[in-house]
Image (cartoon, rainbow, N blue to C red):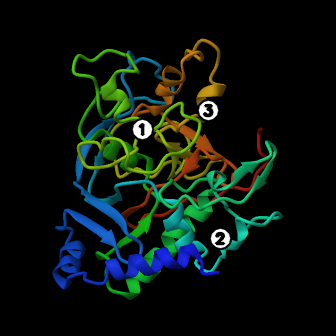
Amino acid sequence: MKSTIASVLTFMMLSSSAMAADDVAQLKSLTAKQWTVPKLDMKMVLIPAGSFTMGSPKDEAERRGDETQHEVTIASPFYMGICEVTQGQYYGVMYPDYDHDSWQYARGPIHDGLAFFYRKRSGGRDYKGGPLLFKNPMECVTWDKAREFCRIITERESKAGRLPEGYVYRLPTEAEWEYACRTGGKTPYNVMPAGGGTNYKDPEYLDSFANVGEGSTTPVGTRKPNAWGLYDMHGNVYEWCLDWYGLYPEGKATDPIGPSEGKKRVARGGCFNGPALFAPPGVIARSDSYTGAAPFLRSASRYRFYPDVDFYAILGFRVVLAKDVPVAEAVKEKRDD
């Protein structure tokens, strides 16, 4: 049986074969406003350099103590994927020869990193196969697997001569993520109702929040983008960042990369469900799925996960093409929970 993944990859390669030389030149000079990664159909948009106030003001509703405001400068422009990495993109890079068509008809073990929402329930308890959801975000993916995805693309694009000098494909830093999410705004979300307020069911919110409270992921890019053309920055799945989780440093910072060590890695953007269910009593209104999840969708909201967790359907990632930065590796120590 011909692999569905192989068919999609063939389409992607054909659709990107007409790339012009001047497009590459503009990418390498950081003047291209948009870029589509060849053979992957991963669309990216240029994020300008600039400064912003990271964190949240003390009077922001549902604010938490790890969101201390401080001034951050992003010194260089970078490209960010307009959407979260999809299942089709992830499997096409990481498991290009895996026979997903045959697997969906068979019981038994599944390979490492199989997206939860590719596993269809049958009979109420047992998981059996189902069609790969090409356009849904990849989830159940570890921090290391997300980085491996980026490394493979970097090597391929470097060999093809399509990288700006000193730039690589990687996970965004926490500062880059919040900067791109806010697009210069200072409100709790990157889109606010015209009259402000905290009615999380206002259409202006729901048109920007990705399927909050619906119980599953949804195809990427189906809600409104923010001002810089980025979709699903609020909702769908949490997105891995490069940094260890820790309290923010005091004072101004330029291109911060987080603590030098830690136990958990930062994830941003909230999700369709997830940790809102485990918030302390009184922090959220659990009776309302939108209200319950909304605090975790805020631009300043921070969450963290052990980097080797591989079974959370609420956790995925987004890719940037940005300056290479040092990455603080894991510290071997016993977990606290």
Q: Secondary structure at mark 3?
A: helix
Sequence-wise, the earlier of marks 3 and 2 is 2
Circle 1/circle 3 CB separation < 8 Å: no
* Left or right, 314 with reference to 323: right
Q: What residue do we see at 58% from left, 48% from top? A: 315
Place residue 118 in its image quadrant: bottom right
- Residue with the mark numbered 2: 100
- Rounded to the nearest whole Å, what is the CA distance between mark 1 and mark 3? 14 Å
The residue labelled by disc 3 is: 275
Residue 188 in sight here? no
- 88 is higher (above) or lower (below) than 65: below
From the viewer's perspective, tell me whether residue 145 is left or right of residue 157. right
Give the amino acid type for the residue marked by disc 3 in the picture.
Pro
Mark 3 → mark 2, Cα distance in angstroms = 30 Å
Residue carrying label 1 = 234
Mark 1 vs mark 2: which is more N-terminal?
2
* Quadrant in which the N terminus is drawn: bottom right
Q: Residues within 10 Å of mark 1 (few under 14, many from 20)?
A: many
In this rendering, which labeled residue sits more in front, label 3 or label 2? Answer: 2
Residue at 55% over, 15% down? 285
Identify the image quadrant of the C terminus: top right
Image height check: is 60 above or below 115?
A: above
- Label 1 secondary element: loop
What's the CA distance linking mark 1 and mark 2? 30 Å
Which one is earlier in the sequence, the residue at label 1 or at label 3? 1
Q: Is residue 196 left or right of residue 330?
A: left
Q: Position of residue 24 (x, y in %)?
A: 23, 79
